[in-house]
Image (cartoon, grey):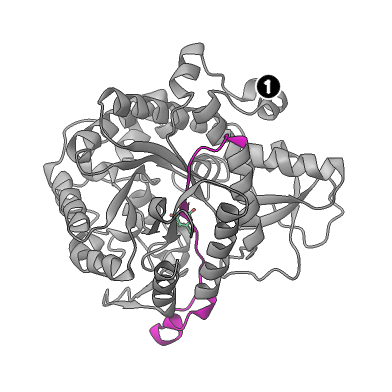
Amino acid sequence: MSAKENFIWGVATAAHQVEGAWLEDGKGLNIWDAYSHTPGKITNEDTSAVACDHYHRYEEDVDLISDLGVGGYRFSISWARILPDGKGAVNQKGIDFYNRLIDGLLAKGVTPFVTLYHWDLPLALQMEDDGWLSYRTAEAFARYAEVCFEAFGDRVKHWMTFNENWCTAVLGNGTGLFAPGRVSDDEPYIVAHNLLLAHGLAVKAYRDGHYEGQIGIANNCDFREPLTDSDEDRAAAQESLEFFYGWLTDPVVFGEYPAIMRERLGDRLPEFTPEQKQLLKGSADFLGLNHYTTHYASRTDQVENAVSSEDGNGGISDDQQVVLSSDSDWPVTSMGWFVVPWGFRKMLNWIHERYNGLPIYVTENGTALANNDVETAIDDTERAEFIQSYTNAMKEAIEEDGVDVRGYFCWTLMDNFEWTRGYDMRFGLIFCDFETLERTPKASYYAYREIIQSS
Ligand code: GAL
């Protein structure tokens, strides 16, 4: 990679997916603890109570991260471990755990990239304040963020406020697939609004605190390629990208939602006050991108291989006025996601152009294979090929198109609690045996190391 000095290769996880220790050392409950213990919500009735037991095995995991040869490790902090009820007393044992993890990484020369919120809202805030439907949760988040900046800001120089606000808004409060499991056409827009304001408040606290470092946000987006060259299909693709990535990113760059959303949604879309616009404008030092797949976009429903709105863009699909489809030649992963590396390259270009060259980190990219026995699972050439083809596409975006990509974080270090899919979907470079908790690197672990070494 030509921008070698600037570029960081990494691997990612999230607290709730790996830590376990759900009732230990003073941790409070969060909405995913509750959701994963609700019958019928998770495949095989799996729960996240133990997950990979990373809370107790982090030293072994830091060694595995270091041996992988990555320069960065992206992980998230569990809000309820730091503030068990979301806003009251600080739990020192929670702070101690992340101190041990951060110091362990730094001792091995691995740079920590920290996400403050990866979906695990303290349950008390959901019950008392209606979670992200309330601005009070945004204020509570800002305080939690400040506690983290004070505790870890001397060593952590790369922060992300939120992971995939689209999922919190649409899957959590639109389709009801994710915690807290609410179903609504309008709540996603209210939730997203409060998440964005929470981001703004936290970034203000970070900047006012004069910490040395960068703070951004990790949003997800699938790419939308126009099905045909018609003006209608091109508009469908562009507008659906604005409804997806633009919705949660335009405000933190420009201080306003995309025009198409304001026009189409009218008063269903909350408005920012002039002060809030100021708070949000320019509030990201970098943009994270979590990217997994691509679809064709068109206006007409006369398409082959239509992708259902549930698999495509969830509860706000009617508002997007887009019909999604795929190509029968595209390989499909165990999650039902299409493997389209050129879509990744175009996605990176789209972000680069829309946000005037703001630095980008690929904060997640990877693939699932549903192999539950270790022998089959470690022979994962498919994953190795996926990573090779997607990192090649990224390389083209950097070297041929001039996109400013600063890093790539593979999802994920080891098989873990894959939300509603429980332990059934394995995304890891390392196999995790959920009975014995033994970790075994897969072929893709070595292949990714090779890609890093030869870059
Ligand atoms: C992302 C999410 C991760 C992980 C991944 C694979 O949406 O941030 O936590 O689960 O998808 O599904």
Q: Which residues are magenta?
A: 354-382
Q: Is residue 106 left or right of residue 77?
A: left
Q: Residue at 51% of width from left, 80% of height from top? A: 381
Q: Can see residue 286?
A: yes
The residue located at (44%, 26%) in the rendering is: 197
Camera-side residue of 187 and 229: 229
Task: Quarter of the image for the C terminus: give it.
Answer: bottom left
Mark 1 packing: few (<14 Cα in 10 Å), some, or many (20+)?
few
x, y percentage for residue 449? 39, 71
Image height of 196 relative to 21, above or below: above
Q: Nearer the viewer, residue 318 or 253?
A: 253
Question: To which residue does mark 1 refer?
Answer: 266
Q: Position of residue 238 (x, y in %)?
A: 72, 40
Q: Quadrant of residue 431?
A: bottom left
> Residue 139 occupies which quadrant of the picture?
top left
- In the picture as drawn, the residue positioned furthest to the bottom comes out as 375
Which residue type does callout 1 highlight? Gly
